[in-house]
Amino acid sequence: MNKQLTIAMPKGRIFTEAVELLRNAGFELPPEFDDSRKLIIDVDEEDFRFILAKPMDVATYVEHGVADLGIAGKDVLLEEERDVYELLDLKISSCYLAVAGLPGTKINDVAPKIATKYPNIAAAYFREQGEQVEIIKLNGSIELAPMIGLADRIVDIVSTGRTLKENGLVEYETIAGVTSRLIVNPVSYRIKDERISELIKRLNEVIY
């Protein structure tokens, strides 16, 4: 039986911090791994295959079994609600989801508009607050929405808050903290349990 582990990861900050974590756990990842432009990278020494994907696609690959494991932000897991198991909080790439808007503005009483790339999270949050809102799905530059009158508020990821500040926006509420999680396909978890358990054990030793 093939015991190779296929791991889906997003490029960018999560990738960089996850690679460092794996190396700290004693896994041999070659130096050129960091700068590769390939979308699929085999690391024969560890019997790993890495799939480099868009952040929102990682959980989809794991759910459908083309990847055994994935490293995904909690924001993606909350938004996508995929059929995967969350194994471990890796405690990397910390940030949070927040409601933001122009300073000193009240949310519209009649059908307030919320712009976000997280429509499910935003809808659930405002529903919990007892507010009916209109969700406007955007894929980028969410900060523009209040500035051009498209929305009363935005729901977005905040890391340092610098982007909000530079665009004249302020935070109004925090929705949830976000870190990156190790997720697994339920079938892979059964048939490759020894390898996955060993990976979890080694990662647990270096997570603080």
Image (cartoon, rainbow, N blue to C red):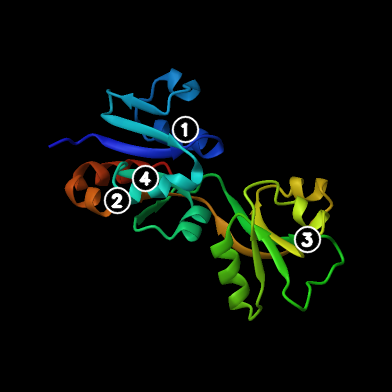
State how far apart marks 3 and 4 are (Cα). 34 Å
Q: Would residue 99 appear left or right of 147 to someone viewing this image?
A: left
Q: Which residue is mark 2?
A: 185
State how far apart marks 3 and 1 are (Cα). 35 Å
Determine the secondary structure under disc 4.
helix
Q: Would residue 38 appear left or right of 168 to someone viewing this image?
A: left
Mark linked to residue 101: 3
Q: Residue furthest bottom?
A: 130
Determine the secondary structure under disc 3.
strand
Q: Earlier in the sequence, mark 3 or mark 2?
A: 3
Image quadrant occupied by the N terminus: top left
Q: Is residue 14 visible?
A: yes
Which image quadrant is residue 67 in? top left
Q: Position of residue 130 (x, y in %)?
A: 63, 81
Q: Nearer the viewer, mark 1 or mark 4?
A: 4
Instruction: Kindly indicate whether the residue at mark 1 contacts the one at mark 3 (C-beta within 8 angstroms).
Output: no
Q: Earlier in the sequence, mark 1 or mark 4?
A: 1
Mark linked to residue 20: 1
Instruction: Kindly indicate whether the residue at mark 2 contacts the one at mark 4 (C-beta within 8 angstroms).
Output: no
Q: What residue lies at 49% left-to-right and 60% top-to-bottom?
A: 78
The amino acid pointed to by label 4 is Tyr
Number of disc labels: 4
The amino acid pointed to by label 3 is Gly
Mark linked to residue 61: 4
